[in-house]
Image (cartoon, coloured by chain):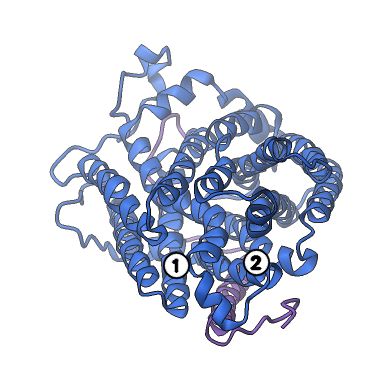
Amino acid sequence: MGGGYSFGQQTAVLQEPWYKWGQAILLIQLGLAILQTIYSLYMALTGAGGLGGGH
Amino acid sequence: MRGTKTGQLFLASVGFFWCFLMWFATAAFSAVIIDKYGLSKAEFAVLASSALWLIPVGRVVAGYLADKMGAPNTFVLILTYTGIFSIISSRVTDYGDLFLARLVVATAGSAFVVGIQHVAQWFDDHEIGLAEGLYAGTGNVGAGVGAMLLPRIYGLDYQTAFLHLGIVALVIAVIYKWCGVAAASKERAHHAQQGANVKEVFYIMTRFTAIALMLQYAMSFGLEISLNAWLPGYYKMGFEEQMKALGYTDLKTMAIAAGSFAAVQSFNASLWRPFAGFISDVFQRNNWTPWPFLTKDVPWAPRIHWAFTAIVAITIMMVVLTYAGLTGILPLSVVILGLLGVCISFGTGSCFGLVPIIFRRNPGLATGFIGGVACLGGITYPLIYGSVANIHMGYIYVAAAVFLPFMLFFVVTFLRGRQVDVDSGLGSRSSWGLSSTAKEAA
């Protein structure tokens, strides 16, 4: 750190194995967000209750 | 799980997810609570904003404690007392008692900075963006999951929900105590402990750069949490006729529908957040600086431009959300809310693409200030939403009265041609009683 705040330096480094599945989880999260939006839009258009919605 | 960084990331993410779930569990049942206690729009606005009252101070204190006594111990402390108060809130019948108990439970939201510190103590610079993104994204979505699932699982029985949430919090606290390790090495933990200094907290709080980023975060994360608390009630009150026409006639189905619509914002704002960090990297790699009036002279200027782009988009979407509400077209409002959520994620992700870079020496303290004080936005906005005669107009009022001045401060701080100095602020290091050897390298 060298004391004090410093500006970021970007260097090329080898990623560890966890990084790959971390990126995969990110994509799954994006998919979840899109699916949830479509599902709620479907509810707003049709009045469907969905799981636990009761009608 | 002990001793592996992925295990610690998992632990922090689960802990924060549950804290977020408890934080906004009251909002998930707001339709039921409004009906049971006969709350007016203004009273509901107070209840919605109360979830955030203690967060600004709580996060600054939590950040300090995380450095001082380690993130696992701080997490255990937060999970334990909020879990106990969640159980207490399930047993009270008076509205005043319920309000006070939930006020304490809501401090679970302070856990954000604890997990940020925990993850930072285990991951190196080149991988910390993804690690923090996974942590924050997974944790934040707890609010959306709560809004969507709690009314489905528990129906109108919010008391049983609060009881179960509290019990699980206590179980997670035990697991965290058992498996949590403060840092990858004892040296790292010791370094953080030494860096926790109250004077340094006040020094960071008075830097113009930190204030500008805090205001940017208030426009993004502050807005996100204000909407978490506000939206379920907003859809019940603002679109009641449209929802009844769709068949959501009784309180339970209306609560489920309103919660699902509200969750659109939370899901998008949370789960797109790591993507926003990725775009910040893209701006930096390509040296994109689209705004002619913002600085291009600092190495991280492209990230500043991306952060500003995000808050411009948020402000525009707030105006559009008001328009969608005024049209009375429910599906349009849901779509716009989703887009607003994505823009909010750009704001939160772009902010924390900058903070660890600018404040390398005290990321925990800087996170505590920026992530904590920005929550004041979450307290203020619901009060504005609830104070206007037309419930749909609140968003445009917040955009005009609050966001435009915040953006102006951001622009002035990072104005082109002006020397951007991270140390610039109220008073020098020595006047705050700090060693000048740690001065910025700007």
Letter of the chain shown blue in the rendering: B
Q: Is residue B299 left or right of residue B48?
A: left
For residue A48, what is the image quadrant? bottom right
Q: Quadrant of the C terminus of chain B?
A: top left
Which quarter of the image is occupied by the N terminus of chain B?
bottom right
Q: Which residue is mark 2?
A: B255
User: Viewed as shown, does residue B45 lie left or right of B66?
Assistant: left
User: What residue is pinned by disc 1?
Assistant: B342
- The answer to which of A5 and B364 lies nearer the viewer is B364
Chain ID for label 1? B
Q: Chain of mark 2?
A: B
* Chain that is purple in the image: A
Answer above or below: position of B440 versus B314.
above
**Residue B311 visible:** yes
SS for callout 2: helix
Q: In front: mark 2 or mark 1?
A: 2
